[in-house]
Image (cartoon, rainbow, N blue to C red):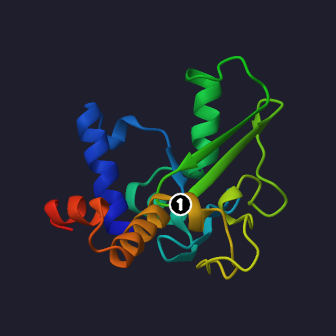
Amino acid sequence: FGGQTAIKLTHALENAGVSISQCESIGLGSPGTCDSEAGVVVRAYNLGWFNVPVCQMLTNRFGIPARLSNDANCAALAETVAGAAVGCKNMVLITLGTGVGGGIIHTGKICHGSNGMGGEVGHMAVRMNGEPCPCGNVGCWEQYASATALKRQTKAAWEQHPHSILAKVIGEQGR
């Protein structure tokens, strides 16, 4: 975690023409379940992170306070401040990427939920006896609608139908 994140943060600052000495704090959005108060990523299955004290690590590395929230929560809040939901006090945002996430804004504030999973819709079961999920459940939405799932489904379809147009296109692109 520390090295890669620090490098990315350093590059982001350089690209913005800002030095760390000009910053008062660091804000981080992470996938997975986050304990914002403790500054810990509790579970980020797609990253293999469990109980990672990211805020303390960033503070130790850069010497300024760091704050953490779930990345979809950050995206939802950003939409209410500078995006499609400006002026909205209540909204839900769904993110589709490596996983499926969600951010909920209620009365203008992020809804973290009682255990930091307020918007973790990707781990909501949508199919009984469905695909196993790294979270330990089965049939999670993330196993059907994320980019990771779509890659897996595409590979399975092409392997089952090696003479299909899909297999031909994938074969031409170097698989």
Q: Residue at x 18, y 66 (%)?
A: 171
Question: Where, by quadrant of the figure, is residue 138 drawn?
Answer: bottom right
The quarter holding residue 165 reads bottom left
Q: How many marks?
A: 1
Quadrant of the image containing the C terminus: bottom left
Q: Going by the image, does 163 lie left or right of 128?
A: left
Residue 66 percent location from the top left of the image? 53, 52
Residue 7 is situated, as x and y percent measured from the top left of the image, at 28, 57
Apparent side of residue 67 relative to residue 10 in the rendered image (left or right): right
Residues 121 and 57: in front is 121
In the image, residue 39 lies at what x, y percent?
Answer: 62, 61
Q: Is residue 130 above or below residue 21?
A: below
Q: Nearer the viewer, residue 59 or 162?
A: 162
Element class at badge 1: loop
Say few, some or many: other residues with alpha carbon within 10 Å of mark 1 (under 14 / 14 to 19 / 20 or more). Answer: many
Q: Which amino acid does the dot numbered 1 rest on?
A: Gly
- At x 76%, y 51%, the residue is 112
Compared with residue 110, is residue 54 higher up or lower down, i.e. above or below?
A: below
Quadrant containing the N terminus is: bottom left
* Residue 94 drawn above or below residue 168: above
Q: Residue furthest front?
A: 163
Q: Residue at x 59, y 22 (%)?
A: 84
Question: How far across and down, in percent of the image, does residue 146 sit?
Answer: 52, 59
**Residue indicated by mark 1:** 99
